[in-house]
Amino acid sequence: MKKHFTQHLHRARRVLTTCARKIRDRRYRPYVVGGIALSVLVTLIPLHLMEQRLLSRYHALESVTIEDRNGVVLIELPNQNGAYGIYTDTIPPRVQELLLHKEDRYFYLHPGINPFSIVRATVQYLTGHRVGGASTITQQLVKNILGTGQDRSIGNKLMEMVYALDLELFTSKEEILIMYANTVYMGNQIEGLHGASELYFDTKLEHLDDTKIMMLLATLSSPSTRNPWRDDNATASRNLAHRLGVIFDPKEALVTQAHTYVPPRSFELSSMHQSCVVSCRTTLDADLTNRLRTILDQHVQLGWGVGARSGAIVVLKLPENEVLAVVGTPDTESYESGQQINMAIQPRPIGSTAKPFIYLEGFAKGLRPYTLVNDREYKFPIGNGFPLYPKNYDGTYRGWITLHTALSNSLNVPTVKVLQYVGLPTFYTFLEHTLGFTPLQDLDTYRYGIALGALEMDPLTLAHLLSIFPQEGVLAPLHLFLSGTTTTTIATPMSRTTSTKMVADPAFTELVTKVLNDRLTGVQQFGLASSLNLSQSNYAVKTGTSQDYHDSWTVGYTPDFLVVVWFGNPDNTPLQHVTGQSGAGSIWHDAMELLMNTDYNKHTPLNFSHVEDVTINNSIDFGSQGDVVTEHQHLLPDDTLITSPQDGDTFLQEAHTNIPLVSPESVSWYVNGALIGTGSRVTFSPTTANDYTIKAVSTRGTSTHILVHIIARP
């Protein structure tokens, strides 16, 4: 046997001698070096892949969070362990010092495992003694990542040792320590020392004193039974402090009241079904949102007596079209009166806030703010087969006025005339194809009711579409999520816009903004003292009220931001004579003033570079550059000689039925060919139920005739 051993020894010596000779020989040196390098690569590549898999599992354990634009967490989701943990990249020096003193005093000396601790633990195990902790912080980190804490088999321990050695090979000690602090379970669904500090002490980890640090470190060995909310923690913390030579002050051992951890949540983001696969940041401003919700809640409380129970506010940052705030309810914690419905994405009749779009199309077809319109009673057909007789909010007809006056005072009758001039098919195309708007119903079911506020839209979509006015005719997608230096777009509930496009001529959006910026012309309807008056003048505003006061709206913008406010009830209960100005207007005023006192307000002036003053009959109005006034002033003629009744009207035959016949000038009145009187107003008293042709003849020889129906009582 000795002979065989000697032979093997000589053979090995010859091999080594030959290798050494070849290494010294320059001809063989590249091959030898290459072989060594290849061997190293063959060894390191699998180890590196193991480390990458471990790091991948580590990052997968972090809770997915959605933050606001300033880093405030809006939503935190549980990880695969059902726990919550937000990773940080620092550990306070004092916490690190005491953590290493307790868990791994030789952390900076060993390669991931501590051989002496392993030998000691093995001897204790074989001799039947209680086994002390042999795992290093690196091994504990691997255990946390792999989730092998409940299965302490020999196989798992060996695997943890291999991963620990591998991790130390590619990762710095500082990184390993931070990873451990982020993943250690601290009880009550919390992972990580930072989260535990917030939960148990309601303060940041860097603000803890030695007593509270001891209370956290005592939790490590038994997080479920020895965390700071449990009685056993006090004794364990005191003993640990004594062992580590730290002063433990019972007076400083103050903790929060035990409670179930409620992660941050965003009511609006959740109800909008907006989320991220990995942690992300939004364009939202959490502080601004909270302050706006407070404003909304205060006004809802004040409006309780007039039947108001809810509201919504949407704020866009311009010109980026970033969603700064979405407030869909005044109270996210209440389950009364539909408070858990996000009204910012619920379609509601938008009232007169549709008028800027109608006038925009009117201006594009040649109308101007100085164009004259006859504000009187008209009859229009609508989709249900019944005639529409539009009336202004105050029930008053003003006769011949300019479109400037009509829009400034939100008059209904002139708006219907503008929509008639534009043409319903043309306006439908503008809404659906140019703006990408998706209506709840076929637009032809609304017809001229669009001008009277019947069209439904949710506040977020309305804000998006209104952005074309401060954006000079450009419709850009809304941005909600930030990704590095770029933003990602979102779709609004009723808009299909996915790319930026020019949808209107800036010359005409400026005309609309110029009218909506004019607070003096609107005093007829809104008065001099109004919630629509702000502390600065570079803004435009429009109110809206739906039929029977179900919805109160106010929308407005500066070049820096746009605000849409809805005020009403989720169950569609009407308000008690609350208008756009008196309801939503007050909320809008406070929201705008709040924004005007933030960094979002750049005091950018409104752009009216395409607008020119126009002098007509010694009065100044405005129009577009190069206008020939006479070509635009009389595009809405009204040469009818009969303003009442309307063609096709039906009256009931009674004993004293008297029908006033009204004309804007003195005419001769004929009924079925017989002259019954002369003047601007006469009375016709039918004696039988029949159809009657009523004709008016002017002194100029022009004439108009209509047909009315007189029916007998059934």
Image (tube, helix red, strand yellow):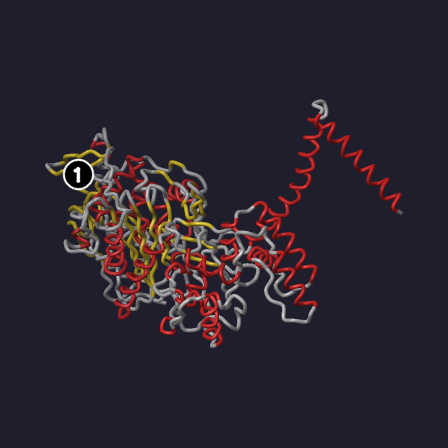
32 is higher (above) or lower (below) than 440: above
Q: Mark 1 — residue?
A: 621
Of 228 and 404, the residue lying toward us? 228
Q: x and y percent of residue 344 in the render?
A: 38, 57
- Say what amino acid the circle numbered 1 marks: Asp
Q: x and y percent of residue 556 in the render?
A: 28, 49
Q: Residue furthest left?
A: 618
Pointer 1: residues within 10 angstroms few (<14), some, or many (20+)? Answer: some
Which element type, helix, strand or loop, lies under badge 1?
strand
Q: Residue at coordinates 24% horizontally, 58% vertically from top-left?
A: 586
Q: x and y percent of residue 592 in the render?
A: 25, 52
Q: Residue 653, located in which quarter of the rendered image?
A: bottom left
Q: Residue 714, located in which quarter of the rendered image?
A: bottom left
211 is higher (above) or lower (below) than 275: below
Q: Residue furthest bottom?
A: 231
Q: x and y percent of residue 29 in the render?
A: 69, 26
Q: Residue 479, located in which quarter of the rendered image?
A: top left
684 is higher (above) or lower (below) than 637: below
477 is higher (above) or lower (below) than 21: below
